[in-house]
Image (tube, rainbow, N blue to C red):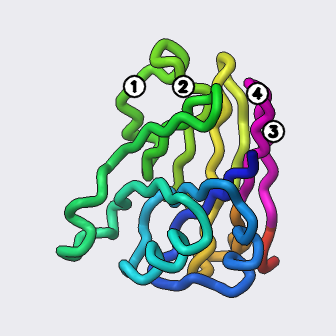
Amino acid sequence: MRVGLISDTHGLLRPEALDFLAGADHIVHGGDIGSPDILERLAALAPLTVVRGNNDTAPWAHEIPATARVDLGRVALYAIHDLKELDIAPRAAGVRIVVSGHSHRPACTERDGVLYVNPGSAGRRRFSLPIAAAELVIDGDQVHARIVILVP
């Protein structure tokens, strides 16, 4: 199973991001979406899990949850925009992957058996950070993550 990860689009869904996410079995957006049409375009590609970011304050975003849990085969994924606001103990909750955004810095680390992935920002460039997204490849209970720089 291939899961596309995207975050911090801030109203801009780049063609490079759409190309990268094409063919995904599932997509997770880590918040700061910026516009409801982005969700429509992503949902047209694959089933979509999305969380609200701190900048998603317009009325259309009120129904989007701050956190979401989704089971992808035998692996549980938990999404939250700002990792500093993590409100669960992932391992104790049976979560294998935590996806976040907010910092615009792509990162992938494993701690205590939990994989933490921030796909970075796929929207407007912030400072000198790259435009990035990520993917998970899930095979049974094995998970491999890869960050992809879309625009250096």
Neighbours of disc 3 within 10 Å: few (<14), some (14-19), many (20+): few
**Residue 50 shows which numbered tag?**
none
Q: Answer whether labels 2 and 1 touch (C-beta < 8 Å).
A: yes
**Residue 95 shows which numbered tag?**
2
Above or below: residue 92 compared with residue 49: above
Amino acid type of the residue that numbered disc 1 sits on in the rendered structure? Ile
Q: Residue 49: x, y in percent?
A: 47, 54
Q: Answer whether labels 4 and 3 touch (C-beta < 8 Å).
A: no
Amino acid type of the residue that numbered disc 3 sits on in the rendered structure? His
Which picture quadrant has residue 16?
Answer: bottom right
Tell whether position 136 is magenta: yes
| Helix, strand or loop at mark 1 | loop
Marks 3 and 2 sit apart, C-alpha to C-alpha, by 15 Å
| Helix, strand or loop at mark 2 | loop
Which picture quadrant has residue 144?
Answer: top right
**Quadrant in which the N terminus appears:** top right
Above or below: residue 25 compared with residue 125: above
Neighbours of disc 2 within 10 Å: few (<14), some (14-19), many (20+): many
Neighbours of disc 1 within 10 Å: few (<14), some (14-19), many (20+): few
**Quadrant in which the C terminus appears:** bottom right
Q: Nearer the viewer, mark 3 or mark 1?
A: 3
